[in-house]
Image (cartoon, helix red, strand yellow):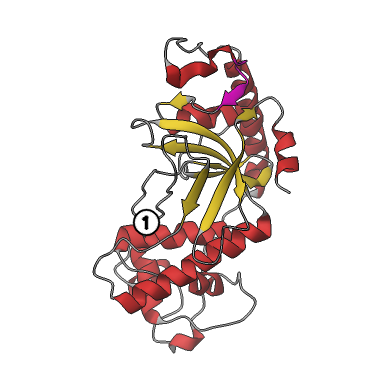
Amino acid sequence: MKTSRDFDFLAEAIFEKLHQSVSISTLKRFWGYLPQYSSTRVSTLDLLAQFVDYKDWEDFCYQTQAPSIDEAPDKITPHFPHKPRYRHTSLMIASIVVLLVVSATLLLHFLPAANDDDPQQSYAATPAHILRRGQIFETCGDYLRLFGISSMKRYWDQPLPHHEDIIIWSPEYHHPQWHNEGERDSLMPTITEWWEPADSLIDDRERQLLMAERNEHLYFTVTRTRELRITFMKNLIDTGYVFLGVYRTDLEKSDSTHVVWERIADECDLSNLAYLEQLRH
């Protein structure tokens, strides 16, 4: 849990698995990401324990030999008895990254040419290292590997290697929670994103509070980082992913209730991704 995006992912994953919401700010305080201290309720600790397949917080404490739940809730602090040892694996990770980059580079020279008769694949004349708007991929792995990424754990939201504020984004058209709306016929010159709970059992007041917090957090995160998104949208043309271009936040049209992304480039040069940093500002 090192970045603000990590807490977004965890909150959504908890909701999808347990159908209960945990405030992003609560998670940040729990992990010490926010400077102010706040006690964590046992009900929240129970949810976190259940998320990792324990019965509740007490069961987690018992099985991991963490401090007893008999302590007062305001004295309970996170306890992780086995700290991962990354020092001995750093060389292995570096080697894997180098292999992935080399493999992706070699792959670019052998990509098959598209069918010139297919209007959706009019990019056939484009060099293999250039992604152009309208290019279609069957799976997310087909395009992530072009960037040297093999992990599918967060395929919908992957930071570009060595550029943490440039995101390889895989939104779903008409997503039930994030929406991702726009003009489909013109391949989405803008994408409007906002979040709302998918659970119909949440009462209106709680729904509004959750929406306000989540959308405000999204807005201030993207305006602070000036995030850039290399966008592949799912279910826009078919069940696969279509490359839409490179997007940046439209600050004039965005606010704390929604974020509007505008396309600023139709192509992406895979051989020189560093140039994208210039487009962020």
Residue 128, image quadrant: top right
Q: Is residue 53 above or below residue 40?
A: above
233 inside magenta stretch: no
Residue 231 is situated, as x and y percent measured from the top left of the image, at: 53, 39
Residue 87 is situated, as x and y percent measured from the top left of the image, at: 66, 48
Q: Is residue 6 above or below residue 214?
A: above
Residue 51, image quadrant: bottom left
Q: Nearer the viewer, residue 47 or 250?
A: 250
Q: Is residue 145 above or below residue 196?
A: above
The residue furthest left is 201
Crowd band around label 1 with a 10 angstrom C-alpha radius: few (<14), some (14–19), many (20+):
some
Q: Is residue 52 left or right of residue 130?
A: left
Residue 200 is situated, as x and y percent measured from the top left of the image, at: 25, 66
Q: Is residue 67 above or below residue 4?
A: below
Q: Is residue 143 left or right of residue 176?
A: right
127 inside magenta stretch: yes
Q: Quadrant of the N terminus?
A: bottom right
Q: Is residue 63 left or right of residue 127?
A: left
Q: Which residues are magenta?
A: 126-132
Q: Nearer the viewer, residue 92 or 218?
A: 218
Q: Quick check: can you spot residue 80? A: no
* Residue found at x 46% / y 78%: 67
Residue 183, image quadrant: top left
Q: Quick check: can you spot residue 204? A: yes
Q: How many marks?
A: 1
* Residue found at x 57% / y 55%: 84
The amino acid on which the numbered mark 1 sits, given as a three-letter code, is Gln
Q: Nearer the viewer, residue 266 or 161?
A: 266
Question: What residue is pinned by disc 1?
Answer: 177
Label 1: which secondary element: loop
The residue furthest bottom is 72
